C-alpha cells in the first residue's frame, strides 16, 4: 500500500469526511459565540454563566483529546472517529432541548467529549491514509476547510438566530453528523498503530480532567466568589496537584497516552508552544468579538456574522496554497510572519470600540486577521504532524489539538477577568467597549510573541520531503483493505462538500 493520492476520487472522499467531521466540532466552537447574548437574556445569565457555556465544551474537549487520540491509535481511527460523531450528535440534541443555563452547560460538557473523540481522528486519518508526498497538501486543505467551518460559525449562527432561535445552532449538527457517518462508512480506510498496547491510560485521563477542571473553575468563578474563598483556593491547589499527578502518571505509567519521547523532538515541542500562544489569542478575541459587535456596535446577529465573512473567504481560497508553499520553502517564514500579521489584525479590531462603521472600524481588522490565519494555520498544523513519528499520528494530532484548546480554555477563563468584563458587563455598551479594547490589545501582543517564538525555534525543513518515519509509516500503520479497494470510478465526486 503506497497511500492515497490527493487527486484520487477516494482521496477526495477521505478528505471530505475528515473535514466535515472536524468541521462540525470547529463550527460548534464558534457558532455558539454569536448566540451568547440571546442565551444570556433567555436564561437571565451573567458573564460567568456565558463563560461556562463556552468553557464547559472546551474543558472536556481539552481534557479528553489525548484519550481520544490514544483510543484511535489503539482501537482504530475510523471506528473512534465515527463513535465520536455519534456522541457529538446526541449531545447536540440535548443542548438544543436545554430548559436552563445549568442544563445547557451540562450538555455542552458531554458535547465536548464527543468532539474529543472525533477531532484527533480526523487529522490522524489523513496522516495514515495519504501518501507522504501528498500529506502536506491534504493537511493544508483540511486546515483551510476546517478553518472555514470555524470562521463560518458566526455567519451561520447569525442566520439561524435571525430566522429561528439559538437552539438551531445545535440542531444543525444533526444532519451534518449523518452525512459524516455515511461518507466515513463507505470511503474511509481503517488504520491503527499495531505496536500500541491495548490497555487504556485511565489514570492519566482522570488526572487530566481533574487538573483542567479545578484550574478552570477557579479562574472563572474566582472574581465572583473571591480569590481567597476556601472553594477557589482548594480548586487552585487541587488543579496544580492533579497536573503534577498527570505528569507523574505519564512518566511512570505502563501504557501512557502521552509518550514520553514525543516532546523530545524540538520541532514538535516548539510548534506546540506557538500553537498555544496563537490559539489563546484567537480564542480570547473570538469569544468577545461577537458580543462586542452586537452590544457595542449594535449589529444584528446576522450582521455580526456577515462581518466576519472575509475571514471565511480568505481561508477557503488560500489555505491549501499556503500549505503547498510551506512544503517548498519550509515553515519558519510563514509561522513567523503569520502570527505577526494576525496580531496586527487583532489590534485593528480594537478600533471597534470607537468606530463601529464596518468599512473603517471592522473590515480592515477582519481582512488582516484573515491573511494572518491563511499564512499560519496550514504550516503550523503540518509541522506539528510531520515532526512526530508516524506511528503516533493519532496522539500527535491530539496533542496539537489539545494545546490549541488549552490555550483557548485559559484565554476564555482569564481574559474577561483581566479586562474587567464580569457580571452583567455585556449589557452595558461603554463598559464592554473599554474591556474589549484592553482584551484585543493583550491578544495582539500574544500573537506577536508567537511569531517571535517561531522565528527563533522553528527549523526550516521542507514539509513535503519524506523523512525516515514517514517512509516506514506504511509498515507501521495497518490499513484495512476493503475501503481502499472499493471501485472508485463508480462515483466520481467533485470537491469536498462544504
Image (tube, grey):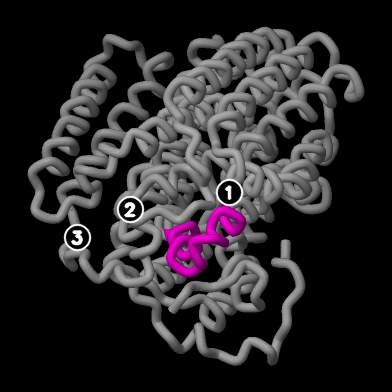
Q: Quadrant of the C terminus?
A: bottom right
Q: Which secondary structure lies at badge 2?
A: loop
Quadrant containing the N terminus is bottom left
Q: Please give the name of the residue rendered at 67% of the width and 40% of the height, measured from the top-left corner.
A: 35
Q: According to the image, label 2 marks what residue?
A: 389
Picture quadrant of residue 339 = top right
Front residue of this view, candidates 112 and 150: 150
Q: Is residue 60 left or right of residue 489?
A: left
Find the magenta span and give its range: 121-139
Residue at image location 43% in from the left, 66% down from the top: 128
Q: State the residue position of label 3.
A: 200
Position of residue 409 measured from the top left corner of the image (x, y, whole percent): 45, 32
Would residue 281 be seen by someone viewing this image from the given angle?
yes
Quarter of the rendering containing residue 18: bottom right
Mark 2 and mark 1: span between their CA atoms?
A: 26 Å
**Contact flag, marks 3 and 1 (Cβ < 8 Å):** no
Which of 171/42 is in front? 171
Near mark 2 (Cα within 10 A), the count class, few <14, some 14-19 or many ≥20, is: some
Residue drawn at the location 39% of the way across and 68% of the way down = 77
Which SS type dominates the magenta stretch?
Answer: helix
Element carrying mark 1: helix
Identify the secondary structure beneath mark 3: loop
Mark 2–mark 3 Cα distance, whole angstroms, equals 20 Å
Residue drawn where x is 60% and y is 77% of the image? 10
Residue 63: x and y in percent read 34, 44
Query: Which one is earlier in the sequence, the residue at label 2 or at label 1?
Result: 1
Amino acid at each position: 500500500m503506497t497511500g492515497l493520492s490527493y487527486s484520487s476520487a477516494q482521496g477526495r472522499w477521505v478528505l471530505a469526511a475528515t473535514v466535515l467531521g472536524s468541521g462540525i466540532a470547529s463550527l460548534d466552537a464558534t457558532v455558539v459565540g454569536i448566540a451568547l447574548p440571546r442565551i444570556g437574556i433567555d436564561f437571565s445569565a451573567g458573564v460567568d454563566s456565558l463563560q461556562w457555556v463556552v468553557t464547559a465544551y472546551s474543558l472536556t474537549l481539552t481534557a479528553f483529546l489525548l484519550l481520544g487520540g490514544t483510543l484511535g491509535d489503539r482501537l482504530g481511527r475510523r471506528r473512534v472517529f465515527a463513535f465520536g460523531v455519534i456522541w457529538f450528535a446526541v449531545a447536540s440534541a440535548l443542548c438544543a432541548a436545554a430548559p436552563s443555563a445549568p442544563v445547557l452547560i451540562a450538555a455542552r460538557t458531554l458535547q465536548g467529549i464527543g468532539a474529543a473523540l472525533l477531532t484527533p481522528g480526523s487529522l490522524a486519518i489523513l496522516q495514515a491514509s495519504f501518501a507522504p508526498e501528498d500529506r502536506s497538501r491534504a493537511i493544508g486543505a483540511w486546515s483551510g476547510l476546517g478553518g472555514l467551518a470555524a470562521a463560518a460559525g458566526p455567519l451561520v449562527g447569525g442566520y439561524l438566530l435571525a430566522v429561528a432561535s439559538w437552539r438551531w445552532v445545535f440542531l444543525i449538527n444533526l444532519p451534518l453528523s449523518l452525512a459524516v457517518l455515511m461518507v466515513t462508512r463507505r470511503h474511509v480506510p481503517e488504520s491503527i498503530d499495531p505496536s500500541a498496547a491495548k490497555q487504556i491510560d485511565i489514570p492519566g485521563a482522570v488526572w487530566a480532567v481533574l487538573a483542567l477542571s479545578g484550574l478552570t473553575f477557579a479562574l472563572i468563578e474566582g472574581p465572583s466568589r473571591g480569590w481567597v474563598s476556601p472553594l477557589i483556593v482548594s480548586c487552585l491547589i487541587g488543579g496544580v496537584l492533579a497536573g503534577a499527578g498527570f505528569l507523574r502518571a505519564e512518566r511512570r505509567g505502563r501504557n501512557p497516552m502521552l509518550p514520553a519521547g514525543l516532546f523530545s523532538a524540538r520541532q514538535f515541542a516548539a510548534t506546540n508552544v506557538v500553537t498555544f500562544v496563537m490559539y489563546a489569542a484567537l480564542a480570547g478575541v473570538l469569544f468577545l468579538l461577537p458580543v462586542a459587535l452586537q452590544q457595542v456596535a449594535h449589529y444584528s446577529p446576522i450582521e455580526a456574522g456577515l462581518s466576519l465573512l472575509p475571514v471565511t473567504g480568505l481561508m477557503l481560497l488560500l489555505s491549501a496554497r499556503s500549505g503547498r508553499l510551506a512544503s517548498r520553502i519550509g515553515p519558519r517564514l510563514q509561522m513567523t510572519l503569520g502570527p505577526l500579521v494576525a496580531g496586527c489584525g487583532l489590534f485593528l479590531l480594537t478600533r471597534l470600540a470607537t468606530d463601529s462603521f464596518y468599512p473603517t472600524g471592522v473590515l480592515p481588522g477582519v481582512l488582516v486577521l484573515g491573511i494572518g490565519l491563511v499564512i499560519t494555520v496550514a504550516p503550523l498544523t503540518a509541522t506539528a504532524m510531520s515532526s512526530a513519528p508516524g506511528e503516533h499520528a493519532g496522539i500527535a494530532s491530539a496533542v496539537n489539538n489539545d494545546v490549541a484548546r488549552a490555550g483557548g480554555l485559559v484565554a476564555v477563563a482569564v481574559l474577561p477577568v483581566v479586562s474587567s468584563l464580569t457580571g452583567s458587563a455585556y449589557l452595558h455598551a461603554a463598559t464592554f467597549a473599554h474591556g474589549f479594547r484592553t482584551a484585543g490589545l493583550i491578544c495582539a501582543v500574544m500573537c506577536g510573541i508567537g511569531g517571535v517564538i517561531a522565528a527563533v525555534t522553528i527549523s526550516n525543513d521542507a514539509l513535503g520531503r519524506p523523512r525516515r518515519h514517514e517512509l516506514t509509516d506504511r509498515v507501521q500503520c495497518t490499513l484495512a483493505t476493503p475501503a481502499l479497494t472499493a471501485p472508485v470510478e463508480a462515483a466520481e465526486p467533485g470537491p469536498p462538500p462544504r
